Image (cartoon, rainbow, N blue to C red):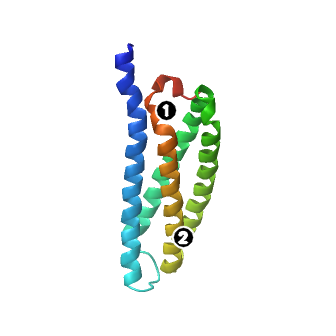
Amino acid sequence: MTDAQATPRAAAIGDHLRDVHEQLRRDLATVRTQLDQLREGGEIPSLPKDLRSHCVAFCGALHEHHTNEDGVFPALARQHPELAPVVERLQREHDVVAAALTDLQQLLNSADPVRLRVEFDRLANELETHFSYEEDELVATLNATDPATLRQR
């Protein structure tokens, strides 16, 4: 493979990361809108089925995204030792987000839409900070890295 062929493939990694984050941001906005509508209607005994389904789907997509990243991060840190502190921070944040997702899923079973919204907002803010940091720190390097070198070993 020539350098000209490798560059578009490599650039797709960083671009894909941003695309995934943008979809997750749209999903967060959808859930937030649904929670607002729920809150406007007052407290109700259970969450609407579509809101519950969207929250569960979002949690699953985010978990899969972070699992995939955790598979790539060690190879990235080996190739770019200067990124080791960044990768360590991102992996710690993945653990924090996983715990917050577990808490959020438990809140889906409660009849407290106000508390659910507060916890959701906390998670959404943490995710936005996480996504922005990850993009700022990794996209340029990912766009310059041959994807074949990042496969799990």
Residue 136 image position (x, y, % from top left): 48, 44
Judged left or right of residue 92, residue 135 is left
Residue 66 image position (x, y, % from top left): 53, 46
Judged left or right of residue 73, residue 26 is left
Closer to the observer: label 2 or label 1? 1
Asked which quadrant contains residue 40, the reply is: bottom left
Few, some or many C-alpha atoms within 10 Å of disc 2 (few <14, some 14-19, many ≥20)?
some
Judged left or right of residue 51, residue 97 is right
Give the numbered dot on residue 119: 2
The residue at the point 43 percent across, 57 percent down is 57
Identify which residue, 65 or 44, lies in the foreground: 65
Q: Which amino acid does label 2 sit on?
A: Glu
Identify which residue, 69 or 111, lies in the foreground: 69
Which of the marked residues, 2 or 1, is nearer the chain's N terminus?
A: 2
Q: What residue type is labelled 1?
A: Thr
Residue 103 image position (x, y, % from top left): 59, 66
Secondary structure state at the residue bearing disc 2: helix
**Looking at the image, which residue sits at the far bottom?**
42
Examine the rendered structure and indicate whether residue 11 appears above or below residue 56: above
The residue at the point 46 percent across, 38 percent down is 139
Residue 35 image position (x, y, % from top left): 41, 73
The residue at the point 52 percent across, 48 percent down is 133
The residue at the point 38 percent across, 23 percent down is 7
Few, some or many C-alpha atoms within 10 Å of disc 1 (few <14, some 14-19, many ≥20)?
some
Secondary structure state at the residue bearing disc 1: helix
Q: How far apart are marks 2 and 1 (CA)?
A: 33 Å
Examine the rendered structure and indicate whether residue 97 appears above or below residue 137: below
Q: In which quarter of the image is the C terminus?
A: top right
Give the numbered dot on residue 141: 1
Examine the rendered structure and indicate whether residue 124 appears above or below residue 139: below
